[in-house]
Image (spheres, grey):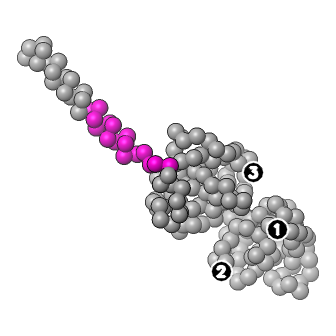
Amino acid sequence: MTRSHWLHRQKAWARRALAGLVLAWAGMIVPATAQETDPRSDMIVRSGLPIPRFVSLRSNEVNLRAGPGRAYPIEWVFVRAGMPVEITAEFDTWRRIRDVEGTQGWVHQSMLSGHRSLVVTQELRTIRERPTSTAAAVAQAEPGTMGRLVACKGDWCEVEIQGYHGWMERTDFWGAYPNEKVDN
């Protein structure tokens, strides 16, 4: 085999290898615009778990990205471990999440926990001894206060907030869907 023939074969092999890498790389790119539409129409379910669903942040520093991958810019940093978030879409190991204020973006699944939590909404809310509006008050929680969601049955949920254990109406906080059965 002559040197020029050998170089020609090497160049052809290199072109095929490069073309294969480009095609493989292009297959991994997801346009950001495709990820910003209705979460039900663009979700690619990888975990087999329902979407949407509530989870919590695992760390005190969670980067919220513009798209599903480390190459996308960080748009926000969450700094409250245990904060409830809603998964609205999945792509490979990335989850699009939304917080109580509606902020959305992508995080790696390793930054999320299946532990259920809640955040008190709108106004001062009462934690009660039993799941009824006439039960004695255990404590009151201000808007923005986070806690652990223990279980939900009907219109009431068992909660633990800053050491107080009791019941709250499901409409008093963000972190559970209407009629969702929660058994943490």
Q: Amino acid at mark 2?
A: Asn
Whether residue 92 sits left or right of residue 9 in the image: it is: right
The residue singled out by tag 1 in the image is 122
Residue 15 in picture, x, y percent from top left: 24, 29
- Give the structural element (helix, strand or loop) at label 1: loop
Report the residue at 57% width, 47% height from top: 66
Marks 3 and 1, Cα distance to the nearest angstrom? 19 Å
Q: Residue at x 82, y 60 (%)?
A: 144
Q: Which residues are magenta?
A: 17-32
User: Can you tell which of label 3 and label 1 is closer to the viewer?
Assistant: 1
Q: Secondary structure at mark 3?
A: loop
- In the foreground, 33 or 178: 33
Q: Nearer the viewer, mark 1 or mark 2?
A: 1
Q: Amino acid at mark 3?
A: Arg
Q: Which residue is mark 3?
A: 80
Where residue 52 sits in the image (x, y, percent)?
Answer: 57, 67
Q: Residue 115 in the image: x percent, y percent?
A: 67, 62
Question: For numbered disc 2, what is the local secondary structure?
Answer: loop
Q: Residue at x 29, y 32 (%)?
A: 18
Q: Is residue 47 left or right of residue 99?
A: left
Query: Is 28 within the magenta?
Result: yes
CA gap between label 3 and label 2 equals 27 Å
| Amino acid on which the number 1 mark rests in the picture | Gln
